[in-house]
Image: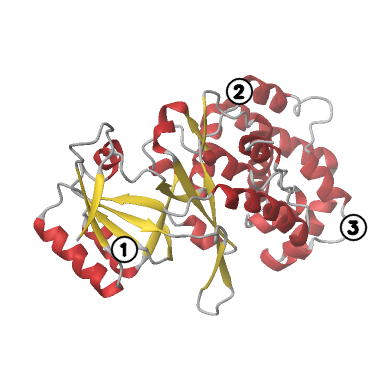
């Protein structure tokens, strides 16, 4: 079984226990570890924020919407299927699984009571509402969403892109194209990272140390076909409808609550989406480190970072003398080697060479 097949076959439903989820990720990470190169590289321009991040050992993560590929982490779906699916709710029954599940519950979900003010009263009020009133409210919401389907789909896509954070690396240090595209025409620098086999790293953070950040490395899968996420978008639509119902009833919308009613069918889906890119980018040989956390406030930020010290730094062949001095000074304080890239004029290949300073 190849890497692409393993990624496609990895499904992590939210209903699984923590141990079961760990087992699914464990086998995947073990496989990826066998593919992980000894060194990975991250190209940077000599902007002040990048020099400051190098000085502080900060490794910054961005979301899909900030990438130079318009398709990055972008949902692909069959709009006609989604429209037909939504229309089916405005028929005889006109109900959603999430509503049926709430009404069938005998006791308030623990997370509802924990995260929603006056949760018990609101839950009992919803249970006591006449079924026809619930259906009427639901149909109005679905009708509104159906009428502005394109806007709703764009909102869902933007949400998925903003919640998926990653840092980009490459196997290709000696590529003149990479230096040109990502280090400001070889006037910047590249940081080398030696992850060894530490593909999965857990950071403790927050004032009380209870917050967790997980990072996982995956190589990009290149191809000509985008991944069909229609079924996943249908799930996200149900979550949107649940949010609208909560707003109608004055209930604060909380992910913990919605997930207890309608568990996500695949928590790995957003990562799968960001692992896949067009064949046009194949020459970059990219790896991505994904950012996951149990603190939703970190996810809502556009950029996030962890601390990870680079193992070496490489200077672009056109770097300015002042930036070269700054980087060499920082590297000296960190006790890491500095190299400079240059042409290998006697080589038959187009690869750049490196020499130690």
Residue 5: which quarter of the image? Answer: top right
Q: Residue furthest front?
A: 346
Which mark's residue is nearer the viewer, 1 or 3? 1
Q: Earlier in the sequence, mark 3 or mark 2?
A: 2
Residue 91: which quarter of the image? Answer: top right
- Residue 78 percent across, percent down from the top left: 62, 23
Q: CA distance from mark 3 to mark 2?
A: 37 Å
Q: Residue furthest bottom?
A: 208
Label 3 SS = loop
| Residue pointed to by mark 3 | 106
Q: Which residue is at 79% across, 35% downward?
A: 95
| Residue pointed to by mark 2 | 79
Q: Which residue is at 52% across, 41% downward?
A: 274
| Residue pointed to by mark 1 | 53
Residue 137: which quarter of the image? Answer: top right
Mark 3 is surrounded, within 10 Å at the Cα level, by few (under 14), some (14 to 19) or many (20 or more) other residues, namely few
Looking at the image, which is closer to me, 262 or 108? 262
Q: CA distance from mark 2 to mark 1?
A: 42 Å
- Residue 250 percent across, percent down from the top left: 64, 54
Mark 1 is surrounded, within 10 Å at the Cα level, by few (under 14), some (14 to 19) or many (20 or more) other residues, namely some
Looking at the image, which is closer to me, 20 or 323? 323
Label 1 SS = helix
Q: CA distance from mark 1 to mark 3?
A: 52 Å
């Amino acid at each position: 079984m190849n890497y692409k097949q393993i990624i496609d076959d990895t499904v992590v439903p939210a209903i699984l226990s923590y141990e079961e989820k760990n087992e699914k990720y464990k086998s995947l990470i073990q496989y990826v570890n066998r593919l992980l190169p000894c060194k990975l590289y991250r190209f940077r321009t000599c902007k002040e924020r990048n020099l400051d991040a190098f000085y502080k050992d900060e490794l910054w993560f961005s979301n899909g919407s900030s990438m130079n590929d318009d398709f990055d982490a972008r949902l692909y779906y069959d709009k006609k299927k989604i429209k037909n699916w939504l229309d089916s709710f405005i028929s005889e029954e006109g109900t959603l699984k999430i509503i049926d599940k709430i009404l069938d519950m005998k006791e308030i979900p623990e997370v509802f009571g924990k995260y929603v003010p006056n949760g018990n009263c609101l839950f009992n009020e919803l249970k006591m509402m006449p079924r026809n009133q619930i259906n009427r409210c639901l149909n109005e919401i679905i009708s509104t969403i159906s009428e502005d389907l394109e806007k709703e789909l764009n909102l869902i896509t933007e949400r998925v892109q903003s919640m998926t954070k990653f840092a980009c690396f490459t196997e290709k240090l000696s590529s003149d194209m990479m230096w040109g595209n990502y280090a400001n025409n070889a006037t910047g620098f590249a940081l080398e990272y030696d992850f060894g086999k530490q593909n999965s790293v857990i950071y403790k953070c927050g004032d009380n140390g209870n917050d967790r950040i997980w990072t996982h490395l995956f190589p990009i899968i290149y191809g000509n076909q985008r991944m069909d996420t229609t079924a996943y978008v249908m799930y996200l639509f149900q979550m949107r409808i649940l949010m609208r119902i909560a707003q109608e009833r004055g209930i604060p919308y909380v992910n913990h609550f919605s997930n207890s009613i309608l568990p996500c069918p695949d928590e790995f889906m957003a990562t799968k989406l960001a692992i896949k890119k067009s064949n046009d980018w194949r020459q970059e040989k990219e790896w991505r480190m994904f950012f996951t956390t149990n603190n939703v406030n970190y996810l809502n930020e556009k950029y996030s970072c962890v601390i990870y010290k680079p193992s070496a730094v490489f200077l672009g062949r056109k770097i300015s003398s002042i930036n070269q001095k700054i980087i060499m000074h920082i590297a000296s304080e960190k006790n890491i080697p500095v190299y400079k890239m240059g042409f290998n004029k006697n080589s038959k290949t187009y690869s750049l060479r490196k020499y130690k300073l």
